[in-house]
Amino acid sequence: MKINDVILRTISRIVVFIILTFGVYLFLSGHNTPGGGFIGGLVLASAIVLLYLSTDIETVKKSLPLDFKYVAALGVLLATSTGFGSILFGVPFMSQTFAYFDLPVFGLTELTTVTIFEAGVALTVVGVLVTIILSISEDGG
Amino acid sequence: MFSINLVILIPFIAAALLPFSYRRFNKTHLGWFVLIVPIVLFVLLARLIPSVASGKTYVHTYEWIPTLDFNFTTYLDGLSMIFALLITGVGSLVILYSIFYLSSKESLQHFYCYLLLFMGAMLGVVFSDNLMVLYVFWELTSVSSFLLIAFWNHRQASRHGAQKAMLITVSGGIAMLVGFIMLHTMTGSFSIREIIASISEFSDHALFIPAMILILLGAFTKSAQFPFHIWLPDAMEAPTPVSAYLHSATMVKAGIYLVARFTPVFGADEVWFWVVSIVGMITLFWGSFNAVRQTDLKALLAFSTISQLGLIMSLLGLGSIALQFGYSADSVMYTQATFAALFHLINHSTFKGALFMVVGILDHELGTRDVRRLGGLMTFMPFTFTVALIGSLSMAGLPPFNGFLSKEMFFAATVHIMEVDIFSLPSFGIVFPVIAWIASVFTFIYCMIIVFKAFLGKPQPEKLDKPIHEAPIGMLIAPMILAALVVGIFFFPNLLGQYILQPAMSSIYPNFGDTADLTPKISAWHGVKPELLMTIGVILVGAILFKFLKLWKPIYGLFSSRFTLNALYNNLLASSVSKSNIVTNRYMNGLLRHYLIYIFVFFVLAVGGYLFYSRAFSFDISTNAPFRVYEVCLVAIMAVAALSMLFAKSRMTATLLNGVLGYSIAIFFVIFRAPDLALTQLVVESVTTALFLLAFSHLPDWKKEKLPTRTKVVNGIISIMVGLVVVLVGLSVVDFTQFETISSYFEDAYELAGGANIVNAILGDFRGFDTMLEVVVLFIAGLGVYSMIKLRAKKEDENIEDQ
């Protein structure tokens, strides 16, 4: 079945970038305003899903050569290893810390180890969601 | 700084790197690279021997979950030193041996990964001071040994043996865990050192004996003591390097370690003495008795290992009697049993390791381990024969080999125990030396079987698959080193006694004054004493019985195979599978509706029941904020959407109505100023809708179900109950005071975590552990979905087993 998807394609080309940017923004702003790894990951995943919906899978695979199973695995590894990372500094498992740095462009910025942990969460969410959706859609199609 | 934690971590790190890097080492055998790990660890530990011998101990603590008293505390003293040296030392030799034993065609990266995991876990067991950490490592040895035993997993016997070993050792481990928790309940500490220091105040506590028995269960299952020994012969399906390592030198000795480690905790109690020494004695006898009937050399060695472990165990039991009397000049005599136990532990690792490797050589080079097919190998395999001879004679307890020394001390300990007035019947003590002597006669016989049946006599090349030839030199290095140790220890036993055994003795008897008293001088000739006469008797009677083996061997046929412990285990396993199948099939009937009923009924009972039970119903609407117009509108919309879903004519309509519900909830979150939740709800709603659309074409037609009225009524009641409970929870949550409020955390979020977003501070900082595990769960669920869809087993691929 061939559906007329000109509108979907045209709009999604622009929208995907907006959603992706929004996802990254949500992820980074999560520490102080609404957002965070989970939501950021969800938004990123939905952008990727939209990409898959509007264009066919082969094209996306060419332009986005990622195996999302590995993305998810990397996320889990990152999230768990931050826990062990704190052990290396002699503090209890899963301790997080933060500090303020004066960076050249951004000015006084707060950097925190939670961001690494949250990045793991986000990658896991993206990886798992896209993997599930892709495998369901590819199944017997 | 050198730290013991690092010693535990190095094998794990190496194991983690192996799967990523093994492809680089295609040309050379992977074992050569793995070999570096135990050698480095051995050297690191060996450098500490002098300072440990002078009484120094190393403690290192990393806080893990300090609120629960779980800390990663490592503790190096004399006792853990012995075991760590065995683990790394024998480990090095076994890996060296395995390089020649396993061809590069096998999946070596798996083998060495499991082996390193196992090595790290064993080091963790002997170094952990915290009981919970010890337990984690303890079960990790079970898991990694499972993987190792089932390494040739295309064979059914391997899988069966691995399962048996794991089932038995893990159930013992769980019993041990309960015992540990009891110890914590009594003493309020998970630290072994602290428990040892304070245990004397708790010896009449109601949990004291149960805790002791449960911990002993863990030790007995791991060390294959009667009646849990049945897993060890089946575990011999593993590749021989594994048998040599796990089933003679390390894993089975974890139980010995545990008993030795807990001797200062429980040893002063009479029950400990009786249980440990009697179980050890029975195991010693039963193992040696059954070893004689085996025709497979590896099975023979398995039973011999069981028997020798029983010997060490009984010695530890006998040695604990010294703690009952407290420290005195008389009681020091009994500590010699413990000394003999530790001494024999080392000796056993040397000679049994060598013997296992010899049997592996025979298997590898000739294709069989059956004594009925072997014979006359002496002239063809002189080096293998020499090692076998040294190992066997040492195991039989003959000079000039180290087994002789510890065997003599064992006899001496059993003779001493007769002098203790611990029973109302003074003559009962004679049982110990008698059993020891009889078991030693059988030990002598099976050692002779190895030497005479396999290596002497007439060669039978027609029964072998391959021509008889000597093993390659590389394969012989490791067993020859062990054989050299067997002889070396005989001539210089006191060096071992002073540097290795003495510090271990002082960790088992912490309050026993001068450590020099605890270290008897080991000498090969100590005059004509009962123990020497016993040894001579063993040789005479053993030689006669061996000569007439054919005449009395039929007595083994008297035991019906239907009434053995193995049959009991198999029946238990089979019936538990079939019984649980019957039970499971009753409720897992494949109807999604039924599963939902279980979930909802459980929810109503658990949550509603708790609300009712805790009288938390009280709620007061008067203090709540007044309703506003759009809230009422939203509720109305949601109610209409929910109700019309019941009467929807098509699946698409139902989905859209469901979407209306979801987005309305998101709007509620917006109104009530929960932007995080609103965002999440919106995105989740969109993604689920997308998922649904993807699956849409696979779903069957939407039909009105013709359900009987009774089912409809039941469903209706359940759904109303669920709704009611949710509403009640929502109403009463405002006034709920059952648990301590956590709002103070939220108020301090900015100071504690540096984040103004409380939700994220909870997810990342305060409850990061939960989030981490949730991520893992999500990942596993994703993999589950993926493999269910992608890797559905195809019918023709199902028979890949048992090639």
Image (tube, rainbow, N blue to C red):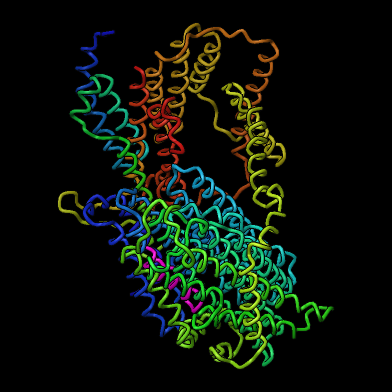
Magenta residues, as a range? B76-95
Question: Magenta stretch mostly in which secondary structure?
Answer: helix
In the rendered structure, does residue B83 fall within the stretch colored magenta?
yes
Is B642 situated above or below B228? above
Q: Is residue B119 left or right of residue A17?
A: right
Q: Is residue B509 left or right of residue B655?
A: right
Return the residue nearer the eye: B731 or A12. Answer: A12
Is B609 situated above or below B299? above
Measured as percent of width and height from the top left, residue B732 is found at 63, 36
Return the residue nearer the eye: B88 or B474. Answer: B474
Q: Quadrant of the C terminus of chain B?
A: top left
Q: Quadrant of the N terminus of chain B?
A: bottom left
Measured as percent of width and height from the top left, residue B782 is found at 40, 34
Measured as percent of width and height from the top left, residue B106 is found at 34, 49
Q: Quadrant of residue B516?
A: bottom right
| Residue at the right extreme of this rendering | B424
Measured as percent of width and height from the top left, residue A19 is found at 26, 29
Confirm whether residue B670 shows in the render. Answer: no
